[in-house]
Amino acid sequence: MNNGKLFEEHVREITSTLEGMPSERDDEVVQSWLRCLNDHNLDPEHKGAARIVPQNVLREHQQEAEDLLRTARFGMEDLYRRVNTMGYVLLLTDAKGVTVDFIGDDKVDRKLKRAGLYIGAEWSEKKAGTCGVGACLATGEPITIHQSDHFDIAHTPLSCTAAPIYDSSGLMMGVLDVSLLMSRSEKYSQALTLEVVKSCVRRIELANLMATRKSDWVLRLNSASEFLGVDPSCAISVGDNGEISGLTHGAHQMVAKSLGKDWKLSESFVGKPFEDVFNFNFNDLPFMLDAETPGEQALEMRGGEEVIFANVQAPSRKKIKNNSGLMPAALNKIHGGDPEMESLAGKAARIVDKQISIILEGETGVGKEFVAKALHEARKKKGSFVAINCAALPESLIESELFGYAPNSFTGAHSKGKIGLIEQSNGGTLFLDEIGDMPMPLQARLLRVLAEREVMAVGAIKTTPLNIRVISASHRNLKELVNKGQFRQDLYYRLNGIVLSIPALRNRQDKTWIIQQISAMVSKDFQLKFTKEAETSLKNYSWPGNIREMINVLELCVALNDGNVVELADLPDHVKYIIAAPK
């Protein structure tokens, strides 16, 4: 087909859109054509040459875009190294569509300039019609305008992929465009190019936020914890007053979505209190500085149940207050100075008010339920604490006990039905002890409950919404059970927000404190005391049964002792025998 017929068909297709005729073009292209016709009064029969602004005008645009130029240049150079072999050139325009920076092939310099892929070229929709930069500026969205998508027939050999660049207050600074002089491929071939350009823009915006908000807290965010350190999807800065001071565009979109707003219509979130956006106390941000696991890095969004992971950077040249002063009282009570338990309490404090699942690992008897209760008590919004021993419930009853049942739903069911233990924990904490012993069929039902955040009783037809924090515990290694096919992998990853390992009693360095705490618990009428020999025996015994065994031993001491002083002779023989053995 000759150029004349191509031109006629192109003009005919554009004018038919004004008449409301259906089009196979992307809707973004059709809307741009309509803007060119209705808003800008452009003539589809006009073959417009590329418009290059005079040097003095270009300098004015470059001076106004100085911050954009400085921030974007490194990203552009990195991107060009990856795409130049495929014939692409890069344009950086300001918010008015004027190209303020350009990277291209010197060998085809004249062709690029003639096509408008050159510094000083003006690519606003009003001047150039439908094009990558112009449509991007008009919609605020990344876009590819491929060949005959262009309004002006002179631009139809080009393939242009563009993405907007926003400043930290939410205003569009400019557009990064990657273009080909000629593409022999279909439009779908540019899908990967679009993702590469969006990725480059994301890094440019992040670099701009990091450079301009050094005196604020900066939170680099990602929905997947695995990529948080290497490729955050967006970022937010927060001032000392607890108000948001800046956002990348991705963060602006994320916050708007979480709050149920259209990001294009919503106001800037700069100045909004941090706690209006995240279900997290701003003063607890120091806890996240040394976060090592996904659970410690998780933040809940307001207005929904979405969890985002954050890498926190403290303000430069500022002293951060000691985290120990922020430790909830309930977590201070789970140890007496043991380093491992102190570290566990510090990790727990960072996630205590997040709706993140927790796995407590440790030998039988180390006090997993005690730690679980402390985690529950440390929360600002406590609700009910419901503990379920998955190993103790008969398999025939566990389903009705966990999920409850509707009235008269089966033979022997109560006429009023029964609320299950999971629903009883609604608004609070569900503690699943010995989760590794839960039957596989019930693991599937539990997974659905956790994934959907709702529970359905046996025999019921309606679900009940849930707002619970799940703490699981097992003396068995759940990861090994998954590898053996004895525990569902998908349930494991749903429960595995963070793993807190409780050390065995024999390895703890705060045994004296533990002895004092248990003594006070088992001897309510008097203060139990120990001779030096008795205390030494208790501290040096290996305690295969852990804290549970120590409770039994000290209860026996209380029962057999007439006074309030425990001597070596009052201890069980096996405890004394171990101590008396030669070292």
Image (tube, rainbow, N blue to C red):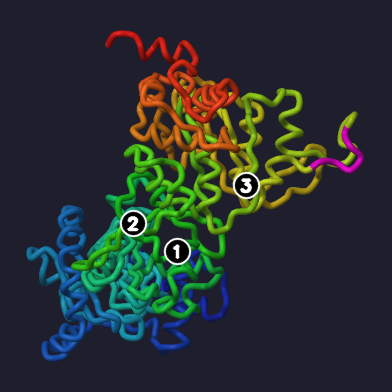
Q: Quadrant of the N terminus?
A: bottom left
* Residue 551 position in % (x across, y down): 53, 27
Q: Earlier in the sequence, mark 2 or mark 1?
A: 1
Q: Is residue 478 visible?
A: yes
Say what amino acid the circle numbered 3 marks: Glu
- In the image, residue 429 sits, relative to residue 4, either above or below, namely above
* Residue 282 position in % (x across, y down): 41, 66
Label 1: element kind:
loop
**Circle 3 is placed at which residue position?**
452
Q: Quadrant of the C terminus?
A: top left
In front: label 3 or label 2:
2
Label 2: element kind:
helix
Helix, strand or loop for the magenta stretch, by majority: loop
Distance (Cα) linking label 3 and label 2: 35 Å
Q: Is residue 2 left or right of residue 335?
A: left
**Circle 1 is placed at which residue position?**
281
Q: Nearer the viewer, residue 51 or 338?
A: 338
Q: Badge 1: how crowded within 10 Å, few (<14), some, or many (20+)?
A: few
Q: Are marks 3 and 2 in contact (CB under 8 Å)?
A: no
Q: Are marks 3 and 1 in contact (CB under 8 Å)?
A: no
Say what amino acid the circle numbered 1 marks: Asn
* Residue 266 position in % (x across, y down): 49, 78
Say what amino acid the circle numbered 2 marks: Asn
Q: Earlier in the sequence, mark 3 or mark 2?
A: 2
Q: Residue at x 41, y 37 (%)?
A: 513
**Circle 2 is placed at which residue position?**
323
Which residues are the magenta region? 413-418
Label 3: element kind:
helix
